[in-house]
Image (spheres, rainbow, N blue to C red):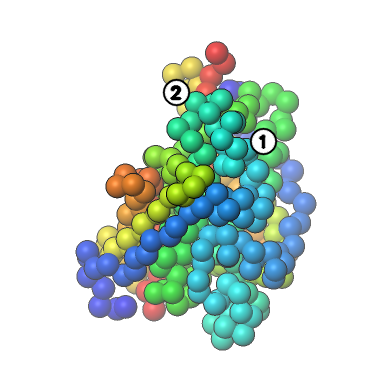
Amino acid sequence: MSELAVGDVVAERTVQLERESLVRYAGASGDFNPIHYRDDVAARVGLPGVLAHGMLTMGLSVETIVPWLGDSGRILEYGVRFTRPVVVDASTGAEVTVVAKVGAVEDGAARIDLTVTCADTTVLGKAQVRVRLP
Amino acid sequence: MNPDLVGRAFAPTAPYLVGREKVREFARAVFATDPQHTDPDVARALGYADVVAPPTFAMVVQDRTLQQLLAEPDSGIALERTIHAEQRFRYTRPIVAGDELTAQLSITGVRAVGKGAMVTSEAEITDASGAHVVTATSVLLIGGDE
């Protein structure tokens, strides 16, 4: 890990989200906003469909790098912008792909940039994790 | 949206006791695969007292401060007109099962955007000894009245 180079891909994965995933996250997090499980409510407020919780996308994205890090306590800072919604279809769900690349290395720390996409659209902006190097 | 919220003093939230099964439940919900979130022996081998919560678990505690903000009678914030625009966490250490956490809310910025406002809400989360664990910051886009 001490030989990280800018541009290296350190981890990547694809996660298949279903409506069940959203209900599970609602229960685990306590966020029961109905736009995350009711089509009628999503339609009424003008959304393109039932959306994944932004915090679910943020949470599953950073978990992509934890096995590589070995210790999640090495995460110093993590931030994202919620730029595009992840629409989760009732029958086909949604596929979220995360690619984690080294963005910068300096003073015992590295910045890992996460590219998070769904249906070829980037859904998180400036998704960056600052990690302490061993 | 009320600009006087900046600098207002809020009471710290009631202590939140982090349970091992809650951490496991949350880890499963965010598709966490690493055993440090679920297996106490793996967490102990890393030097932690119990299972380590995923990084975004801090939101569960921060959410109590957002509820405080929404409950302020003069906040001018309605949930149905609120969009979560940005989220950040700055960690001193990860949250571990057994932690008793308290969050202190502060509103650090209110900026007019069209008819609405961009509000920066910060929660400083500390453990039972008063030591800093994580600061969670949300940027909320609040729509204006119709």
- Amino acid carrying mark 1 in the image: Leu
Quarter in which the N terminus of chain B is drawn:
top right
Q: Picture quarter containing residue A62? A: bottom left
| Residue annotated with mark 1 | B69
Q: Name above or below for residue A118 compared with residue B41.
A: above
Q: Residues within 10 Å of mark 2 (few under 14, many from 20)?
A: few
Circle 1 sits in a helix, a strand or a loop, which is it? helix
Does residue B85 appear anywhere in the picture?
yes
- Residue marked by disc 2: B113
Visible in this render: residue B130? no
Image coords of residue A128 (percent x, y)? 37, 55
Q: Amino acid at mark 2?
A: Val
Please report the residue visible at 61 percent of the width from the left and 61 percent of the height from the top.
Answer: B26
Q: Residue at x 52, y 39 (%)?
A: A50
Res A63 label: none
At which x and y percent is residue A47? 48, 31
| Residue B122 screen position, x and y as percent | 57, 44
Q: CA distance from mark 2 to mark 1?
A: 19 Å
* Mark 1 closeness class: few <14, some 14–19, many ≥20 residues within 10 Å: many
Q: Is residue A115 left or right of residue B2?
A: left
Position of residue A86 relative to residue A21, above or below, is above
